[in-house]
Amino acid sequence: MTLASETIPSLVGFTICKSRYKFTRVLGSGSSGLIFLADDRTTSPPTEVAVKCMIKAQSNTRQDFLQQQEIEFHQAMSHHPNVVTLHQVLEESSYLFLVMDYCKRGDFFNYLMHNKHYRGDDTWIKLVFAQILDAIEACHKKGIYHRDIKPENFLVGNDGRLVLTDFGLATTNLWTKTFGAGSALYMSPECIGFDAHKAYNARSNDIWAVGVILLSMVTGHNPWNQASPMDHCYHQYRQDINFLQRHLPISDGANTLLQQIFRREYVRNITLSDIRARIEELDTLYMDPELVWRGGFHLKSAARSYFGGSSRMKYYFPWVAEEKRVRHESLDGDGLRLYAMGSTPTSDTRCSPSSTVESAGPYTPEMRAQQVSDVDVPPAEFEPGLSSAETCVEELSCDGAQPVPAQPPRKSEPAAVPAFLRRFMDRFALDAR
């Protein structure tokens, strides 16, 4: 299937809104459009903004309804400090443009992947996770259910605050039969749609995704590829609700909280307020180092890959920190001297688990979450005009350049997998999916 973003030509160098915004480069792409970086030339110096470009749908069609719904939902939430600000909505004969704040630090997924300072820091985790809860809870209070909650849809603002974006799959219908909406890693079992005759609760589906994000923040792993009985890890979790704690370095309190979030829908009665309160009550989200040392192969490996390179590595694997110190100070020290504090190191032997359910461990996060290809979102009533975002009609223009013809569909290039993640996946014979 050709994505909408693959049919949008290069608009770099063009201007919109009476030459106010000039496109400078492409920031990213998705299933519904391209995100451009643009200069707002009404300020001195020019202010950088992000502009989402979508192919304008034909009037009175289903796609037209969905585009207008996305705009209305985003406008309704734009005032919230943990939602990216939508400044203007501009119409051109062929395109829609959503002008938003530009978050230079990128999305939260890449932040988690490429930063290690927060690993093991309960205070930081609680503070940032509270911002995620704030954004989603504010949406729910407005009767808006996002349905695509994931780290990629939170941006790191220029002041360090997390802001939610992309309301393309949101709905005001609490109960919905739009199955498969969102990203597979974060979907609840009922959203995946094995029981297609029964509507699922969109609010509860968002809460499930919150649990997956929390686990990713605390361990660097997702619990499973999808919450399906066919998924080995999810199947094993269904058989043993302590499966996650046996494989990942989470505390008893964190494990209990995740068990409450990952219940089946008919008994999943935990709310976002409950999650907030229970997180604050926890002394720590992390397993005691001594319990990690006594754990199994998967638990030790998960802890070592997560804490490796962080300041807390020395608490979980002191012999590794000592090994690095001795190697630096002495070129001819023998291996037995490298292990300090009387601890017994884990084996360096590399082995791959079999594909059986018993040996499967939680997955490392995917670089690109899966998107549903064609979503039939149920109609929703929504009161427009809840934001001061401006709408105007403007033709594209380009300073001294000819219009760029439509390009043939481009193949999306897979995102590069960081070296440390690739090594981890190779060790356990996992494929980057």
Image (cartoon, rainbow, N blue to C red):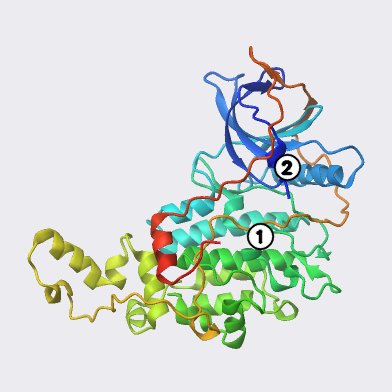
Q: Residue 329 placed where, x, y %?
A: 10, 60
Q: Position of residue 184 (x, y in %)?
A: 65, 64
Q: Secondary structure at mark 1?
A: loop
The structure residue drawn at horizontal position 61% and vertical position 57%, both measured from the top left corner, is: 369
Crowdedness near tag 1: few (<14), some (14–19) or many (≥20) residues, C-alpha within 10 Å: some
Q: Which residue matches tag 2?
A: 4
The dot on residue 251 is: none
Report if residue 33 is visible in the image.
no
Q: Nearer the viewer, mark 1 or mark 2?
A: 2
Side of 366 where 310 appears, left or right: left
The answer for how far apart the CA atoms under marks 1 and 2 are is: 18 Å
- 223 over 385 or under it: above or below: below
What's the residue type where badge 1 is placed? Ser
Residue 30: x %, y % from top left: 66, 46
Amino acid at circle 2? Ala
Q: Residue at x 61, y 34 (%)?
A: 36
Q: Residue at x 18, y 75 (%)?
A: 339
Question: Would residue 229 appear left or right of 39 to someone viewing this image?
Answer: right
Which residue is under mark 1? Answer: 183
Circle 2: element type: helix
